[in-house]
Image (cartoon, helix red, strand yellow):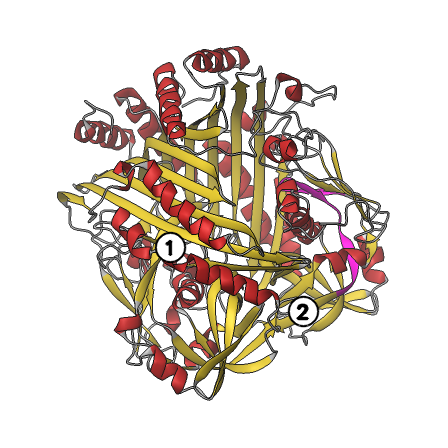
Amino acid sequence: MTEGFDARKFCEVVLDAAKSAGASYADVRIVSRESEGIDLRIGKVEGLNYGATLGFGVRVIVDGAWGFAASPKLTMDEGKAVAQEAVRIARASASAKRRDVKLAPVEPVEGSFDGDWKVDPFEVPLEEKIGVLRDADRLMRQNEKIRVTDCSMDFWKTSQVFASTDGSYIEQTKVESGAGIAATAINGNEVQKRSYPALGGDFAAAGYEFVESLKVIEHAEEIAREAVQLLDAPLCPSGEFTLILEGSMLALQVHESCGHPIELDRVFGMESSFAGTSFLTTEKLGSFAYGSEIINITADATIPSALGSFYYDDEGVPAQCVDIVKNGIFTGYLSSRETAAELGMPSGGAMRADGWDRIPLIRMTNINLLPGDWSFEELIEDTADGIYAATVKSWSIDDKRLNFQFGTEIAWEIKDGSLGRIFRNPTYNDMTPRFWNSCDAICNKDEWHVWGVPNCGKGEPMQIAHVGHGVAPARFRGVRMEAAR
Amino acid sequence: MSFRWMGEDKILTALEKTLTFSPADQTEVTLSVGSWALTRFANSYIHQNMASESISARVRVVFGKKVAAAYADVAGEDGLKDLISRAVEMARHQDDNPDFVSLPEASDAQTTRQVPKTYSDATAECTAEHRASLVRAVIAESDRVSGSAAGSLATWAFEHAVANSLGIRSYYRSTAARLTTVITCPEGGFGYASASSVDLDNIDVHAVGREASETARASANPVEVEPGEYECVLSPYAVAEVINYFVHLGFWARAFQEGRSFVCGRIGEPIVGSNISIWDDGLDPRTLLRPFDAEGVAKKLVRIVDGGIASELLYDSYAAHRERKKSTGHAGSTNPIMSPGDATMDQMIATTERGLFVTRFHYTNVAHLMSASITGMTRDGTFLIEDGRITKPVKNMRFMQSLIEALANVEMIGRNLKLVNSTLAPAMKVKKWRFVSATEF
């Protein structure tokens, strides 16, 4: 926030203006976010960007309908004007309403909460950060068939104030960090890429210590070698296979086939014209066999340092852990105060907005496939004939989140309990419930990791959320595969 | 929060003053200021309704071959001055980029082409009440088929300006309006329609509502058909997606220079059918107009595919300098246009023995880069064509298709172009399109 700015007073002025104009409920968020991005490409730092954004958004209910207005000008007069604009917009909404908005109750909260980070990435010298990427780049390009390299680091520091007419006043600050490298080998018409630790990198609600823990330099030569090997690798065979998914690929699988369909606003049709709806309709709650008995999935916003964690959501609801699938049965949703009220439940605390000029939507927190009890070695040894596929390459799923196709950067043949030759261009295609019901083994907590996904898109206007997925490699039976070509 | 333009003089004067604060060899300042509003509806009521003012400034500084950038939501003198300082500090720690030559020069901003009016006051001044009334009109069309309407009506009004220390001074006002709707009928029918324009008054909201409603009614109770290769009639919504992928996977100079484009080694050669021509033109009055790009360079008409031949690439200044060429004004966005044919939709359907009609695609993604293969689903109105007529709605299908192959097998092209976001696309009939699986609805 700017020096001398009295955030509490500003919030009081905004909320009073909204109430005076006729709002039965109002909240205001002031959001300040700094960002830094470094992109090193084929030995050259092509992107070195610093960003700063500061503004506020006001959300109101008037005559039983929503209105929202926002501005980057943090003055008392602008605060009043924006609150009045939000009320005017809500009145327009009320001209096309079917029923009044009702909100699940929430206890008012006063407090200030800081995330957990050790090394502020904005204090680490740029030369040091660029140096790490440069070393990784140099090692990847030692291999002459590597024609393109991409190395990146991204950092965010976000401070937010939330205040509502329910009596909450919550300050939260968090730091997020991440990095990734990728090597692309090209030979004529054949282009093959390998990424580490995942496509686009891995991210956490942590400081620079997380980037150091990724050890990108130590993995540079390995991914370069694999990218080159893929150029001459056989195409992935077609047919039905036993498929073991590596962690970052499984994280995306959870994201697309579980995370999005459990968003209760999608279920209620609010996203139907854009991203779509959900096959997980409310009559399935508590009875639908989403997966096999070993499938347990949670939405947990309380995991320390995970990218989808926070203290309070953007409606002032405390972060919590919600059971989504228990022993294979579908048991819960990601919800907001409004959508939870429709089911007569308390909010699950999943409302988040992408900055000050966006309205909160139901977003994933950390959607996690809980670990099983296999070591990775045991899982491979136990597989007589199958395919181990790693690292996201492409993804697509229908608008109810049933029919999906994912491509991975690489796959290994599994024969008689051992990893063998590699395949290029693998894709797999299935229907969500059949796929999760075919899961017969999940690796244990030693293999479990929360992958940070900083680019989950949803809504109009588009909002990008930072979410997480805790997973360990898992095995699926009878999955259709073919090579992309 | 009533809308008013800042004006060219005020904005460019502010940018010129900002340039004087910079100690860099070269400096570029860009500023976008304006407002946007969006009304979303679902289940036939407004559930999200918002408006915001917006300021976005970006500074790029160059010391020799060191380049760095900083951006922030600022427009005032102090804020822009701070932004210069931040970018300079970033550049101090930057490495040389041997491929960087220069920011664009003043002459790059010049154009002899006529620039159409890029904005509409009706769009800029649209109120929440007016947006609500237009949405109610769509809902009324949906009610006629007992449907449930969802969608959004969005408006934007922005001023964009770029100034750099080499003399670029570019400014334009822009507005845009877009209405999209998906209407759902009780028996599982879905229908989609959308319209975009610089001028909100040019959008016929009743027609958009009717189009989606009629498709929804016709697509109720869909049946399953076997995956496989089908003749395919694609609506302009689907064709726009095809064109966008085709252009973006193949014709960015940067990807071409790195060997990651399917036109590598094929410029000047036939790449698709001779009936296919695609160009990019930010000054075509039928599209959402953009007279210059993010570097202030005037948009040029780029003949991407000319009579089936891969012809020209899209350059920003960085990629252009690597080949000692001029930027085509493509730092950022595109406005692809496909040449129309002479067929009507009825003729395309009447000449199809057994095929599918696709209203639009959903969640498409690249499956294989060098064959320009994409995968995705059909959505919101997929129909079986038998013996020259649409006979029944079908459940949605997944496809995996090389766009190079598809555009080499286009049998008929529609005579009308439709603006889909920033793309002008006709309908077209493709000899074969590969569907690989089906879904449940």
Q: At label 2, which amino acid type do we have? A: Phe
Q: Quadrant of the N terminus of chain A?
A: top left
Q: Label 2: chain?
A: B
Q: Nearer the viewer, mark 2 or mark 1?
A: 1
Q: Main secondary structure of the magenta part?
A: strand
Q: Quadrant of residue B405?
A: bottom right
Dot 2 crowding, Cα within 10 Å, few <14, some 14–19, many 20+: many
Q: In the image, what residue type sits under mark 1?
A: Val
Q: In this picture, which residue range is highlighted in magenta?
A: B417-432
Looking at the image, which is closer to me, B265 or B150? B265
Q: Chain of mark 1?
A: A
Disc 1 is placed on an element classified as helix
Relative horizontal placement of residue A400, taking residue A300 as reference (left or right): right
Residue in front for this viewpoint, A1 or A50: A50
Q: Is residue A10 magenta?
A: no
The spot of residue B350 in percent (x, y) is 84, 61
Q: Which residue is mark 1?
A: A216
As drawn, A59 above or below A466 = above
Q: In the image, residue A242 lies at what x, y percent?
A: 48, 82
Left or right, A467 with respect to A241, comes to left
Name the mark on residue B17: none
How far apart are the two marked residues, 2 and 1, measured between alpha carbons? Answer: 40 Å
Residue, disc 2 = B435
